[in-house]
């Protein structure tokens, strides 16, 4: 009877969105846990999920880094000192691939090195932030009006000097000065100039999920502003290093991991 009672008291742990594609995001949901009870989670692929209280459950977003090898992985949830594991698969992301390897001189100039250092210093602490409130509702929208042409998709793969290189976001073709809109509600976690990415904005949508916008000609929101889905946040431009014409680089992260924005536009996550 004691064993039956213990089994009945065990939390329910589900992983939604698995098998998980490279660059995709899964949802960990833990229910049957008392309020105030300590719950932690860990993975065997160098990502530590952060759990948040949501509608009587504890939830966490779990991203698969786009260079992560395919195969079986494990998420372990610990509740009151007892561990529960879930095994799932990470499968090929199906990324577009440039067929021919490239050999180039990519030794960065002093300016490029400084720009990269500045970028990491500014964005690393922002990626670590997470609001305990879930601001977004439903599916995300495209941050531009109309049907924007994707010139470089998320995960676009090249082999450069023998190493695999994948694109961390979506490049969207647009006219100089075209309005850029918030794809979902959130808090502006960063709005400023970075030499690498020019006019740059990051929106925290809650639970560590963020959207990023690079190369804009101007910004219409400041750090700390709250925005709604469809609010204008800036204008398309061609600012920063490594841009040859007007376009919007639209990226998304779960903490420090870049994930595929298309997933969040295709279907709601965590309604």
Image: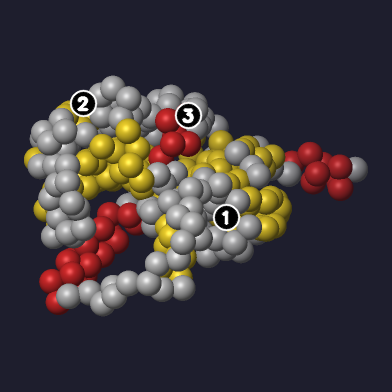
Q: Earlier in the sequence, mark 3 or mark 2?
A: 2
The residue under label 2 is 231
Viewer-side residue, 130 vs 179: 179
Q: Earlier in the sequence, mark 1 or mark 3?
A: 1
**Numbered badge on residue 20:** none
The residue under label 3 is 266
Residue drawn at x 32%, y 72% is 104
Q: CA distance from mark 1 to mark 2?
A: 35 Å
Res 265 quadrant in image: top left
Apparent side of residue 6 relative to residue 243 in the rendered image (left or right): right
Viewer-side residue, 66 vs 49: 66
The residue under label 1 is 41
> Residue 77: in sight, yes or no?
no
Apparent side of residue 95 relative to residue 71 in the rendered image (left or right): left
Q: Residues within 10 Å of mark 2 (few under 14, many from 20)?
A: some
The image position of residue 167, as x and y in percent, is 38, 54
In the rendered image, the vertical position of residue 128 relative to residue 188, given as above or below: below
> Residue 19: in sight, yes or no?
yes
Q: CA distance from mark 3 to mark 2?
A: 20 Å
Residue drawn at x 36%, y 45% is 152
Asked if the residue at tag 2 contacts the one at tag 3, i.e. Cβ–Cβ closer than 8 Å, the answer is no
In the rendered image, the vertical position of residue 266 relative to residue 93, given as above or below: above
């Amino acid at each position: 009877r004691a064993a039956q009672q213990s089994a009945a008291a065990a939390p329910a742990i589900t992983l939604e969105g698995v098998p998980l594609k490279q660059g995709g995001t899964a949802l960990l949901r833990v229910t049957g846990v008392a309020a105030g009870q300590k719950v932690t989670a860990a993975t065997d692929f160098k990502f530590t999920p952060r759990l948040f209280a949501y509608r009587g459950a504890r939830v966490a977003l779990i991203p698969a880094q786009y260079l992560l090898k395919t195969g079986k992985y494990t998420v372990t949830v610990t509740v009151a000192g007892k561990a529960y594991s879930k095994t799932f698969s990470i499968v090929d992301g199906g990324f577009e691939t440039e067929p021919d390897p490239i050999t180039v001189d990519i030794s960065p100039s002093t300016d490029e090195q400084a720009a990269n250092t500045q970028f990491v210093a500014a964005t690393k602490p922002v990626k670590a932030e997470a609001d305990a409130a879930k601001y977004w509702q439903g599916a995300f929208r495209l941050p531009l009006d109309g049907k924007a042409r994707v010139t470089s998709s998320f995960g676009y793969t090249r082999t450069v000097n023998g190493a695999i290189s994948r694109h961390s976001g979506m490049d969207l073709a647009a006219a100089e000065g075209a309005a850029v809109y918030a794809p979902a509600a959130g808090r502006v976690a960063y709005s400023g100039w970075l030499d690498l990415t020019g006019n740059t904005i990051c929106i925290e949508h809650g639970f560590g999920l963020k959207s990023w916008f690079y190369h804009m000609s101007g910004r219409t929101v400041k750090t700390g502003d709250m925005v709604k889905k469809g609010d204008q946040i800036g204008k398309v431009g061609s600012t920063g290093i490594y841009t040859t014409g007007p376009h919007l680089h639209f990226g998304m992260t779960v903490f420090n991991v870049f994930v595929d924005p298309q997933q969040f536009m295709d279907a709601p996550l965590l309604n």
